[in-house]
Amino acid sequence: MMNEPRALSPIARFLLTKHLACTALALIMLSAMVWLPILFSSIPFLALLFGFAAVILHMLTPALFALIFMGGGMRYTLQISGLVALGVTVFSGFDMLLGIMVALFYCVLPALAANNLMRIGGVSRSATQLLFAILVAVVVSLLLGAQSQDLSLQDFVSQLLAPMFEVMQSSTAQSGADQLDPKTLAQTQQLLSWTLPGLMAFSLWLVWWSNIVLARKIALRYGFYTGASESVLQLRFAKPIGYALMLSLILANIDAGSLQYLAASLALMLAGVLSVQGIAVAHMWLKSRELQIVITMMYVLLFIWFMIVIPFIILGLLDIWFDYRRNENPTLGG
């Protein structure tokens, strides 16, 4: 038998259904990385612990707005988003652009993804929508930043990374340890500058999509989710994603300046999302054969050995055309 839905606690109901309370909660979560570590700055261990907690609170903001949409609808979500935009604008010294960007990225985008998730085939649709939205957001941010500094995209990212490497060198000098090889540092910085945009975009996509899935799970648990309940193991991207990956890999190997740099970043991001599809394929195949121990080993290996992700990228890419899960789910039209 299915578990009976739980009732929301009075505090949770108040925070989620009242405009000002909900806005205050969202602003607290969004700004947690600013104020929470400062409260314990005099105690290094607590500062580190609460700094980690602040990051988690901040990154759970999309789940909050997905929950707001699932429980209150789009109109209520847009009202809260407008109040959040106003709050961010005021607290940032009346930076209206920042307020609008936060409202769109943290508030409206999760609500739209949650809306897609509630439809038939929503797992793939919401994941694809988030993929394109985050890709555009990262590319536009890089282009605007590079243009403001009159730099190429790669030089701009290298400039962002420069303070981190300066801190590494100064820390080494202060500790009296052997100096790091400048050539090795330069190569590491160049490698990071090539991989950072793609890995950042993939990480944001994974966090946002996980937030949407988490919000659905919570909404189901408390009985206010009314859409389709498709398993996340049904994630499957369309053929244009596969073609885009292959094209970006070709362009990434052609010396074409910023175009080559953007192609490499796109290839990294698409490879990442297709690896998630490949993992879903493998998980479902093993689950259908009741190989739970092998599933556990698969995730442990993914955690400790990064290079094992490559076969999952290939599997996810091939699954776009061959749909390896069709025989595992005959009721879904396979």
Image (spheres, grey):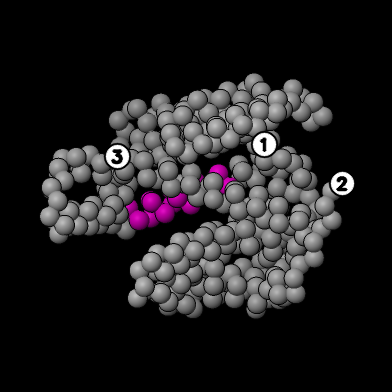
State the predominant SS element of the stretch in magenta.
Answer: helix
Mark 1 and mark 3: Cα distance apart in space: 33 Å
The relative height of residue 172 versus residue 100 in the rendered view (above or below) is: above
- Expressed as whole percent of the image width and height from the top left, the position of residue 230 reads 74, 41
Q: Quadrant of the C terminus?
A: top right
Image quadrant where residue 253 sits: top left
Residue type at mark 1 is Leu
Q: Give the residue pinned by disc 1.
A: 233
Where is residue 47 drawn, in percent x and y? 40, 69
Q: Are marks 1 and 3 in contact (CB under 8 Å)?
A: no
Region rendered in magenta: 130-146
Q: Which residue is mark 2?
A: 1
Quickly name the residue at label 3: 191
Q: Who's the residue at 35% across and 56% down the image? A: 145
**Residue 2: image location, x then y, percent:** 84, 48
Disc 2 vs disc 3: which is toward the camera?
2
- Residue at the image point whose x is 64% and y is 21% from the top: 322
Is residue 97 in view from this perspective?
no
Q: Are marks 1 and 2 in contact (CB under 8 Å)?
A: no
Quadrant position of residue 199: top left
Neighbor class of circle 3 (other Cα within 10 Å; few <14, some 14-19, many 20+) is few
Local packing at callout 1 (Cα closer than 10 Å; few below 14, some 14-19, many 20+) is some
Of labels 1 and 3, earlier in sequence is 3
Q: Residues within 10 Å of mark 2 (few under 14, many from 20)?
A: few
Question: Is 80 in front, or is 272?
Answer: 272
Q: For the residue marked with disc 2, what is the amino acid?
A: Met
200 drawn magenta: no
Q: Helix or strand or loop: what does disc 1 sit on?
A: helix
Residue at 13% from the left image edge and 47% from the top image edge: 178
